[in-house]
Structures are given as C-alpha cells and as structure tokens.
Amino acid sequence: MSTQVRGPARGRAPHPSPPPGPRHSERSTSATGLLVKAVMLGLTIGIAIFAAFPLIENGHWLGLTVLAATTAGLCYLYGTRRHIPAKYLVPGTLFLIVFQLFPVLYTVSTAFTNFSDGHRGDKQDAIVAIQTASVTQVPGSTQYALTVATTGDPATGPLTFLVTDLKTKVVSAGDAKGLRPLPGSRVTVNTAGRVTAASGYTLLNGAQASVRSKEITAFAVPTAGGAIRSQGLSRAYEGRAGRAYETACDCIRDNKSGKTWAADETVGAFVASDGERLAQGWKVGVGFDNFTRLLTDSDISGPFLRTLVWNLAFALLSTGGTFVLGLLCALALHSPRVSGRSWYRILLVLPYAMPSFAMLLVWRDMFNTDFGLINNLFGLDVDWFGGVASARIAVILVQLWLGYPYMFLVATGALQAIPRELTEASSIDGATPFAAFRRVTLPLLLVALTPLLISSFAFNFNNFNAVYLTTDGAPFPVDNPMNGATDLLITYTYRLAFGGSGAQYGFAAAVSVFIFIIVAVLSTISFRRTRKQEEVYS
Amino acid sequence: MRIRTAGVVATLTLALAAAGCGTGGSDKPGTSQSAGPAAAGGKLVIWADDKRAAALKPFANKFGQENGVTVQVQAISKDQQTAFVTASQQGSGPDVTVGAHDWIGNLVQNGAIDPVQLTAEQKSGLAQNALKAVTFNGQVYGVPYATENLALIRNTDLAPDAPKTIEDLVATGKKLKSQKKVAEILCLQVGQNGDAYHLYPLYTSAGGYLFGTTASGDYDPKDLGVGKPESIAAFTKISKLGEKGDGALKRSITTENSIATFTARKCAYLVSGPWAITDAKKANVHYDVSAVPGFAGAKPAQPFLGVQTFYVAAKGKNKALAQEFVTNYVTTGELAVALYQAEPRPPALTAALDQVKGSDPDLEKFIDAGANAVPLPAIPEMATIWDPFGKAESAVVGGADPKTAVTAAAKTISGQIK
C-alpha cells in the first residue's frame, strides 16, 4: 500500500513569492548557499571517487567513463550560474534512470537469457569450475607437510614449496621444474614435520603467504603422477586433474575415460554425445524461449489465466473493500456531532502503524483450524486455508483489516477539503443526506482519490506478502501442486521461478515482463477514464 | 528559512543522485565497497548464521593471531545459500562459508565452492555418515562439524514407554486424548503445504524412496521414486494416519506450533531434531529421545541426516588461507566443542563427540535414533522435490486420494528435472 498520503489536488492556492528581504540577509543566504553547494559538490566528487575503486578493480571501463562524465557534468552544471532549468531537471532525470529505467531494462534483458542456477557466470568460469572440481588425489600418493618459501623477496620472489614426506621425513624443494631432495643438513624440521628453517630460502610466514594466496593455490609442482598442490598453507598433496578443456574441439575431455563434452552455445552447457550435461554451465541468450515457454507449456499457461482472474478479483476486492470501509469510517467521524473524534481516529489508524509482514503471520496463525484464535473464539471448526472459498475469504478479510486505515486516512483528508457549503446548499435544495452524498460529495471525493485507488489497485495486484505469508497459495488442487486457489500471479511466478529447480532468473524476468504489461495496460485504461471523469466534473 | 531548507534538500538530492548514478552506470549495481587493496597481512572472511558466528569468533581470532592475518566473521541471518551464491558471483563473497551439506549440488553447479583434499587420518577422525554426506561426484566438498536428524521426543510423564511402532504410538496417543490428558495424538509438523523433511521417516518406513542410487552409491536423479507404486502405497499408509483416519497427522500442526504444543504438554509425542531440546528443557518437560517408530511389520523409519559443513569458496580472495582454516584447523577438536555449546547438535568429529557426550546423554540418543539415517540428497535435483512432495503430503493428510496427489507431484517434479 502506498504510504504517500496526498491531499486533494484541487483548491491549492499558489504560494505568493516571498517579499524581497533586506540586502544583508540575502547576502548571508547566498554565502551559506555557496558553502552548502561547495560541501555538496565535494561530497559528490568524494562519492564518485569511492565508487570508482571497485569499477577500476573489476575493469568496468564503460562504467568508469559514465561515472566520470556524470560527475564532471554535475560539477559543471552546479558550478556555473547558467542552465537554471537543467539544475531542476537533472536530479529527477538521474533518479528516473537509476531507479526506474535501469531496473526495467535489466529485467527485460534478463528475460532473454537462461540466467539461472547452473547458468550464472560466463563460459570461462564454468571451465575453471569443471577443471578445479576434477582434481583428485592420486590414489596411495604421499602426504606432505608444506612450508611456502622463496629464494627472493617474500612479497615478490619466485615461490618454492618445501615439502616433507610425512612418512619418510625426507624434505624436498619443489618448483615449476619439479621436485628435488634437500639434504637434511640444510633444513630444520619441527615435530609436525614442517620445515622451520632452510638455508638459501626465505620462509613465508602466514601473513606473507596469505597475501600471495592466489599464486600459492595456482602453484603446482609437476610429478610423474600429476602435480603437488597446496591444501592450505601447511599441507600439500599429489593431485591430478581428471578433466581438462581443449580449445581445439571446444570441449571438455575426461583424462581417464576419454569421454568428451562439447560446448553447446545455444543452451550454455557442455553436452556429451549421449546427451549427458555437465552441471556447470554458463549464461547465454535464449531469445524468446522464456516467453514461448510461458505461453506454450500447458502446465503454466492454463493456470496462468485462472490465476489472472482471481488476481483481478483480489486486487479489486481488496482495493474496493478497503475503500468502502475506510470511507464509511471517515464519513462517520466527519460529522462534527461525534465527540472524541481524534481518539477514534488514532484507534482506527493503529493497524496501519503495525508492520504488515508481522501482522500477516499473526493472522495466518489466527486462521489455524485447531489452534487458531478465530475458530476458538467463535466456536467454529472451519478449515480456513483448506477450502477454496474460505481461503479466499480469509485472504480478503486480512487485506481489509490491513488496508482500510489507509483509505480512512485519505478519505478523511479529502472530505475535509470539500467545502461544507456545497452539502448545505444541496440540503437547502431539498436533497436527502444520501442524495447529497451520492451526487455531490462522492463525485468530488472520487476526482481526488481515483489516482490513489488506481495505484492501490496496482499495488494489490502484486501484493506478494499478502498471500505468500498467509496461505502461500493454499489450498492446492490434488492434481496440481504448482498453482493454488489463492495464488496471485506474483506468488505463482515466485514458485515457478524459485520454488522448483533452483533460481531461474531468466524465466522469472519473462513472467515479470508479462505482469508489468498487464498492470501497465490496466492502469492506462483507468487513468484515461479518470481524465474523462475530471472533464465532466470540472 | 524555507528557501535555505529547500536548497539543502536540493543539494542533498543532487549528491544522492550522483551517488546513485555512480553505481548505476556500471554493469553490477551495488558491488562491494570492501574491495580496497588487501591489508598488509591478508584477510579471511567467514560467513555463518548468527549463533555459529558468535561461537566461531574467538577461534577465528586465535587462528588470525597464529597466522598474522585478520579474520572477519560475518553473521548472515537469512537466505544464506542464495546470498552466498549471488555474492560469490559478484566477487564480493566470503572465503569460507558455513552451511548445510545439501547445498553442495547447487553450490557446485554454480562453481561457488572448491573440493577439499583431506588426509586419510583426517577422514578417519570424522563420523563416516557425515563424510559420506559431504561427498559429491566422488569429491569431498567440505568439512563436516555437526550432524542432525529427527527423533521421537516423548513426554515421559504422559508416555513412559518408547513406542515400538507408529501404531503403538497412535494407540497410546488416542488413549491419552480420550482421558483428556492431551489435545493431540502426535506433534509432527505438516502445515498447510506439507513438510517433506518431517514426513520422510514415515515415508521410508512405508516403503517409499526419493531417488535411487547409482552403482557408486550416489543419488541418481534419473531414478525418481516419487510416483512409483511404492510411493503410492506409502502415501496410502500415511493417509490412514491423516485427518480422515486416526487424526495423528494434521495440517493444523505447523512449524510454528509443533514444538510449542509439545512443551505446553498438549501432546505426548514430538517428532523433531536436536534443536527442540533447548525448548523442552526450558519448559521443564520430562522427556526421553528415541528413534522415530515405523509402521508395524514394515521397514524401519529412516530420518534424513543433515550435516553442518564448512566450505571453501571457489571465488574467495584468500583461498590458501581458507583451505588452511577449513581443512587443517576445523578438523581439530576444540572448535567442534565450542560449536556444540552454541547449539547442541552431535559433533561430526568423533574426538569432539567423545568429549561432550558424557555430559549430555541426549546426544547419543539422537545418534542412535539416526543410526540408519540417510544423508539428505545433495544433488541439485533435490530442490525440485520439497514443494510438490509437501503439497502431496498435505493433500493426503487432508483426506485426498493418495494416487492422484502422488502422481501430480511426480509429474511436477520430473517436469522440473532437466
């Protein structure tokens, strides 16, 4: 529910421009203004520099260019006295780009990819993951205690692994050329078998070694059976990579079985000739696949329509119901004859002050068949979330309770803006109070409140929490565990995209695009109708 | 005054806009800001949930001092696995993460963790079923530190004897209920949308299975047990315990109220894990722990074995140090004991278990109850099971036809397995 409470748009007098003040006060304002401006521009530049570091580190040169250009542009814009209109327009435009346009474009572009669990990174990531995962210890190979050393400077010198065979206590030095034994006279070994001193070598302590972590994990001393690799900083093992990527065939080959998995760029995975797929895939564009799946898969498109109908009913009922209830309360408390009006108003607004997600969970427990407050209080035995109708009623009831204080607030505000003379005039003309309300007050209210009702409708249309936290879509038909009777499109999407085989962002984005289109169309139609309505009454 | 305020608001807006744009222009909005040059001695970042993070801190600091590096333990309270995968992908993830072993399949397919190479000695110091649980595609993907499985916790004042079969349990429960001593026969959480984890012991006892195994002992995603005649038979047995049958299984008993109902002495039997013990002790319930009973004349009930595990992040900035911590430090006893004290689950390290079991008889009872537990499948396909299986459970418990419910679940699951 939108938290923004706007008063009626009508009847707002333009603010008179402030009278010109004495000269000295104007100067002090501009001096403070200048200071604030300098501080703010400094802050902007500071934040820009702060944001530049990760961009440089990750090599996002395009992002860096955009950042630099924007900062320079802002400095220029607010540093000069010219371009007054732009000074007002630019912040709004930036916000629009960052918070509206960018997410929408990002969602739309994701909808055309297979971005999901197992297809998150790029191909290089997948190759690295496959190769790393295939390194196994050579069966029966030696275990070594490890000390990382160098022949030069600890920070930059070439690495050497000083390894002690834990069984024979023989110390060897290993580098890219291979392993060669070190005579016992040249080294000191502690009880755990680790080398603690070696002539001709500088030993790296934990801190020095951890700084060179990447080099150490990549370092391998070739042996006949594979290579000696580090396992942490104090232990090494002889391992062998079982699978390797080959550029010539653009495939992964298993060294033992000789089986190959060729890269398939249409699905973003390595696939063998027998159809076996390696788990680690990468992100590729899939065109309209996600959209066609949504339309052609009968498991999805069938319930989609049914869900859409319930979703519309849910949004209409929760918006309309809360509006009617809120308006009735507002009307009742609008009469000056009610005493203690402000107390009633505070009481009415209380539910609105509670965090809705916590209240939704409380309501869910209150509808519990055996332990719930509602059944216990009224002596009922209703299986609330077990039946289609009762579950839907329950969801709407909760929405009513949560939503009417908001409508009450806005209706109170709008009522107070309607001049009492109008209703008085109509009563002099002989209209009953109901007729006066229907023909004078309500139309005026609606002109002010329709935009709010439309935005409230759009919000309730995608009111994920309302369903996810109470019924989670229940009850489900026995023959379809994917689509429940109280599911909204958004909770249904969530289950499709995240409930099943891991996260499927690409598919979820495609469904979001659909929902976006539906909401956009509905909102456009309603706003057009409102405009006509305003033309009638103005 | 008004003008000045407006000016301040405008400039603030401007600064914010600029900041927003700074990140908005890049491919990845909101990448980590911690990516400065590495501290002189290197840094190790560990992610764990709130309780474990607190227990880990002193040991992490000790490790840091011994190695001359900074160690940061960060508590991640929600959606740890998703947060870890996403952060790893963006390069802002930790070096080490602590989590359940059934994450492995998903973490491996996303290239988020590396296998660890343990020595034969280190392997022999761990509980063998825990080690088996963290082994995936023939590789060990993490170091287990604690195990957990379901057991039957019973109120000894109400039910002095451990039931041999589920029928015994139901009979005693019904008797207690008719004497108005309890309100429910059994506290086994089902909830509106089912709970596959808690139902699993009964499902296996009645002959059902989730995935078959390959020759090498791994779970085989191609052999789906849900939908097979065995699973329908199992659900038919389960439906007799449901709301239209004995009423031992009810959808109104949920995650939120099952333990509370037991500690309020409204039911004599609770099926839950070691985490329920703290509550039972707090409520001064006299309790005993035994294995979840199976159906009479059927197979024994097999609960799932869950294993809490330390993982080395594949995209961590300090992998050598992370491996050192996970494979050469976590495998020592002290830390396992501290983590046990943070939350009483049986340590996976046999030496640590021997140390604590004397003072806590429940531990051994839980281990005995889980003697035939099966490791929770870690294959990514397991993610497709939970939701449809749970829905089938809740439908059957509610009185629906088992065959229709199981067949629908099987169709949904196999449709999602690639």
Image: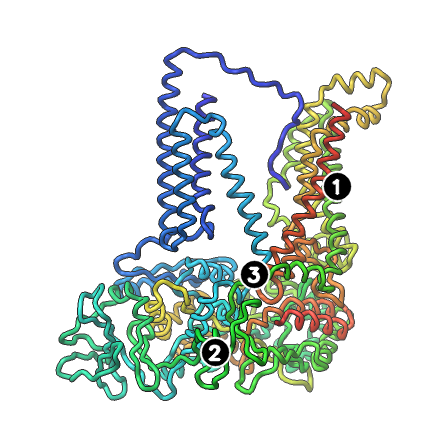
Q: Mark number for residue A321?
A: 1
Disc 3 with disc 2 on a shared chain: no
Quarter of the figure with residue B163: bottom right
Where is residue A403 drawn, in percent x and y? Answer: 68, 41
> Would you say the residues marked 3 and 2 are in contact, meaning their CB atoms lie under 8 Å apart?
no
Q: State which quarter of the image contains the C terminus of chain A.
A: top right
Local SS, label 3: loop
Q: Mark number for residue B135?
A: 2
Where is residue A265 drawn, in percent x and y? Answer: 54, 67
Calculate the distance from the C-alpha at mark 3 to the C-alpha at mark 1. 44 Å
* Residue at x-position 36% and y-position 45%: A50
Amino acid residing under circle 1: Gly
Compared across the picture, whether B215 is left or right of A87 comes to right
Amino acid residing under circle 2: Thr
Give the crowd class for mark 1: few <14, some 14-19, many >=20 residues within 10 Å: many
Q: Which residue is mark 3?
A: A285
Q: Nearer the viewer, residue A533 or B319?
A: A533
